[in-house]
Amino acid sequence: MRRAFLLPLGLFCHGGNLQMGSRVDLVTLWTVSALMMFPQCGHLQVLTVKPNWAAFFTGESMTITCNIGEGKYSDWYYIFMRDQQPLHQYSTNQMYFSQYLTTDLGGRYYCRVSHMNTRVTKDSNVVSLTISGGNLIFQHPAVVLYRGETVPLRCRCRYLTDMTTAAFYRNGALIVTDPNQRKLIRSENAVEISLPLLSDSSYVCRLNGVEESPPIMLKVEPSRPKAQLRIHEAPVGKNITLMCSIMSPSPGWMIFWYRGTKDDSLTAQDIKILSDDRISTSQRGVYWCRGGRGNPTYYTEYSSPIGTGNTGRLEKVWKHHPAK
């Protein structure tokens, strides 16, 4: 049986869900889910900033890149947005470079991509950037951060100065740190500390007890992101391919692989590395994965377990739940 559907002129992905835009003429489609036609909708796209900081001085430069979670970057058109306004027309360039920053270039940045063939459109995560004309700034990584994650925080001066008197404050209270744990970055006139993030908080840094950076409200996600594991079926005797993705609009994750239980990690002798998030192995069993980043390593939630039998057919494992 065949049914008639209104084919949308544009399909918009938001949070991994397919949304319809304006419609055109009736067309005839087989009665299958429209999502089957647009697998790109399920993958996250991530906006990254280089250097990886959320605050800059006027006169500095930065590069923003729109990273597509899967497929070729050349299959998409890109447009970069600031505070809901386009910075240029759609193009095939996945990078936006700003050579001389001014205070009016601060704001909420994200990228919008449109697939050349399917017309699927989707937005990246939003990154808030601050451009300061002052002498002192507080810097944190320009990525989505999670509760319990330890991240570098910087107090940075525009001009060459002695940074040993720099002090960090959270919600108005002095953050006391071991002087031996501080990292002086003299070439950038900065001092850096690493702190675990526990909740949304306001941060500033002060120099010589007088000069103060503009306050920064640092927000953290309350829940850990989760890994998603997929396996390509393979005939008996053939290697299976495992693909692990982190369901987070934030970069920098290293993938950790497991077979059997969470204590049974895979070694280099067990697998063939195909890419950063993909491996191949001939051994059947129950597989898991998770991501990690930072120092000390902050881990995502484990993926759901997926098993393969001797036939190479896939089987979702529901009964086997290792201990936390």
Image (tube, grey):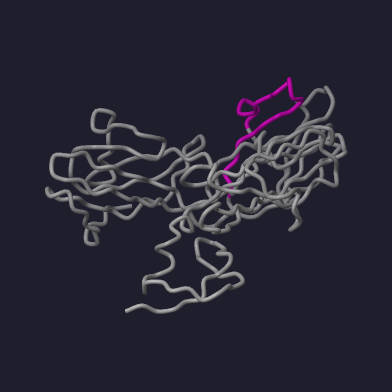
Q: Position of residue 18 (x, y in %)?
A: 51, 66
The residue nearer to you, when weighing 310 against 1, is 1
Residue located 87% across and 39% down the image = 133
Residue 195 lies within the magenta run:
yes
Q: Is residue 220 left or right of residue 60?
A: left
Up-down: is 300 above or below 223? above
Q: Position of residue 134 (x, y in %)?
A: 87, 38
Residue sticking out furthest to the top: 187
Image position, residue 291 (x, y; %):
42, 43
Closer to us: 83 or 56: 83
Give how far across and how far down residue 40 sits, in percent.
47, 55
Question: Does the stretch in magenta take in 186?
Answer: yes
Q: How many marks?
A: 0
Magenta residues span 178-197
Which residue does the image show at 54% across and 42% down from the upper left? 73
Q: Image height check: is 287 above or below 27?
A: above
Horizontal side of 179 relative to 132 (left or right) equals: left
Front-lying residue, 217 or 106? 106
Apparent side of residue 323 relative to residue 149 in the rendered image (left or right): left
Quadrant of the frame with the N terminus: bottom left
- Residue in the picture at 61% in, 48% down: 77
Foreground: 148 or 122? Answer: 122
Tell me what residue is drawn at x 70 percent, y 23 percent: 185
Horizontal relation, residue 99 to residue 299: left or right? right
